[in-house]
Image (cartoon, rainbow, N blue to C red):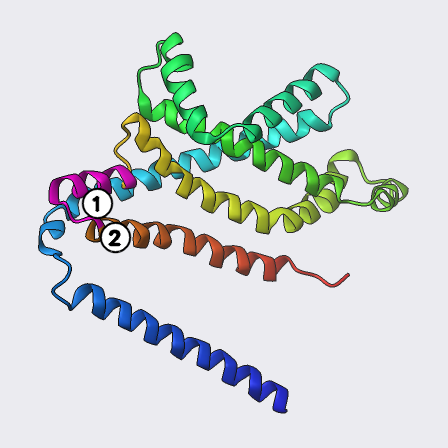
Amino acid sequence: MLQSFFKQFLFYFQFILLACLLGFFCYLVFYTQVYEWASVWEYRHLFLKGWLTTIYLSAISLLLSVIFGTVAALCKMTKFPLLRYTAIAYIEFIRGTPLLVQILVFYYVIAYALNLENRYVAGVITLSLFSGAYIAEMIRAGFESISATQLESARAICLSRWQTYRFIIFPQAFRLTLPALAGQFASIIKDSSLLSIIGINEFTNSAQQVNSATYSTLESFIPLAVGYLLLTLPISLISKKLEQRFRYET
């Protein structure tokens, strides 16, 4: 009884403290004369356009990265040496080099050699390949976490290979990799800000343009932080809901 009361008190205390800090921050930023928001407000259409572009690029990159990651994970677990070593080389190279370097090399070297002039396509492919390498390791770890006894039990009750994957491997692997995948999906949204280095007019690039035009640094980048938070926070909440739905006692 006392322990439950203490937990509730601690929860409400943290909530009130957070609300007070947030209120003080909003008062400091919006109601004092230190910061000038009028000039930044004139560029609200530029923020909205960049925000929508970030959503578009992130959504496509998210879909492609899941495809690349799944294929790479299956190739790494296969018995064919060519596919396995190709997947290993891809994963290790991507995970061992910075995304910024990959964007520059892919756009200014590889895309130029292939006559790929569309910077949006080049940026999406680079971001998808980068995230796909991490997703591949998550999927592989999820598959390999399934114990051999469960596979033997599936064979004992005469389940086919597809039925084994459908009813035993896939549900458990999805549940085990869900938190890591949610974190990676949020990282895709934040990593898309690096595409501004090749001139893509996404959210970060829009904030930089507003900052250059108004010389209002904080006023330009606070909406940037809020905009990314509006994109990543729902992913975290949906992930928690899915974890609760697929959770079971062992």
- Name the disc covering residue 47, or none: 1
- Name the disc covering residue 172, or none: none
Residue 16 in the image: x percent, y percent? 39, 79
- Identify residue type, mark 2: Pro
Q: Does 215 sit above or below residue 243?
A: above
Q: Quadrant of the C terminus?
A: bottom right
Cα distance, mark 2 to mark 1? 8 Å
Tell me, yes or no, whether the two marked residues, 2 and 1, touch with CB atoms within 8 Å: yes
157 on left or right of 88: right
209 on left or right of 132: left
Q: What residue is shown at x 52% (from left), y 27% (from top)? A: 97
Residue farthest to the bottom? 1
Q: What residue is shown at x 48% (from left), y 44% (from top)? A: 185
Question: Is residue 124 one of those drawn in magenta?
Answer: no
Q: Earlier in the sequence, mark 2 or mark 1?
A: 1
Question: Is residue 215 one of those drawn in magenta?
Answer: yes
Q: Which residues are magenta?
A: 204-217
Residue at image mark 2: 223
Residue farthest to the right? 156
Residue 138 in the image: x percent, y percent? 63, 40
Residue 87 in the image: x percent, y percent? 64, 23
- Front one among 194 and 116: 194
SS for dot 2: helix
- Identify residue type, mark 1: Phe
